[in-house]
Image (cartoon, helix red, strand yellow):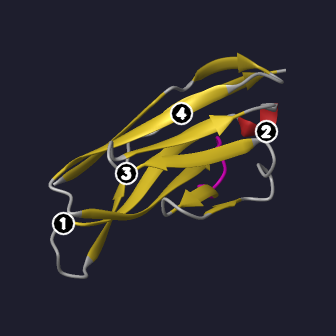
């Protein structure tokens, strides 16, 4: 089984920064891609950023402020969040698409989430 554990959330003032981490563990043959999503109270979960270890892509709302990166050797994905705004307040979830064996079959896993609260 694969487990994803996020960390780094907390309370920060508007304009501040936080760095989220997500470590994948378990029987993992390879990681295809990793993503960050977030869910604010009363809203649906939304995409934030994606990386396959090479390319990256971001939601328009975070472009220029957030940076996603991945350390494949450590099976860890990071989300550097700068110039935080009150609208960024949400639970942030890590998502990974991984192969458990050498066969080209990928499974989708989620972390438990980490709370980010931005005070104005």
Rendered location of residue 58, percent (x, y): 70, 58
Task: Give yes or no for contact between labels 1 and 4 (Cβ–Cβ under 8 Å).
Answer: no
Q: Which of the two labelled residues, at mark 3 and mark 4, occupies the earlier sequence position?
A: 4
- How packed mark 2 is, by other alpha carbons closer than 10 Å (few <14, some 14-19, many 20 or more), is few
Residue found at x 25% / y 79%: 105
Q: Secondary structure at mark 1?
A: loop
Q: Which residues are magenta?
A: 39-46
Residue, disc 3: 72
Q: Which of the two labelled residues, at mark 3 and mark 2, occupies the earlier sequence position?
A: 3
Q: Secondary structure at mark 3?
A: loop
Residue found at x 71% / y 43%: 66
Whether residue 39 is visible here, answered yes or no, is no
Rendered location of residue 9, percent (x, y): 54, 26
Q: Residue 87's image quarter?
A: top right
Q: Look at the picture and state if 51 lies above or below 11.
A: below
Q: Which of the two labelled residues, at mark 3 and mark 1, occupies the earlier sequence position?
A: 3
- How packed mark 3 is, by other alpha carbons closer than 10 Å (few <14, some 14-19, many 20 or more), is some
Q: Which of the two labelled residues, at mark 1 and mark 4, occupies the earlier sequence position?
A: 4
Residue, disc 4: 20
State the separation of the CA atoms marked 1 and 4. Answer: 25 Å
Task: Give yes or no for contact between labels 3 and 1 (Cβ–Cβ under 8 Å).
Answer: no
Which quadrant of the rendered structure holds the C terminus? Answer: top right
């Amino acid at each position: 089984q694969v487990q994803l554990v996020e960390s780094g959330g907390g309370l920060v003032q508007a304009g501040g920064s936080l760095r989220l981490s997500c470590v994948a563990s378990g029987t993992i043959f390879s990681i295809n891609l990793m993503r960050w999503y977030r869910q604010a109270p009363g809203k649906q979960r939304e995409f934030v950023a994606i990386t396959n270890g090479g390319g990256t892509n971001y939601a328009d709302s975070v472009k220029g402020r957030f940076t996603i990166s991945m350390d494949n050797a450590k099976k860890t994905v990071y989300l550097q969040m700068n110039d935080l705004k009150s609208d960024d307040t949400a639970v942030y979830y890590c998502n990974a698409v991984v192969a458990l064996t050498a066969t080209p079959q990928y499974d989708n896993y989620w972390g438990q989430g980490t709370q980010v609260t931005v005070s104005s």
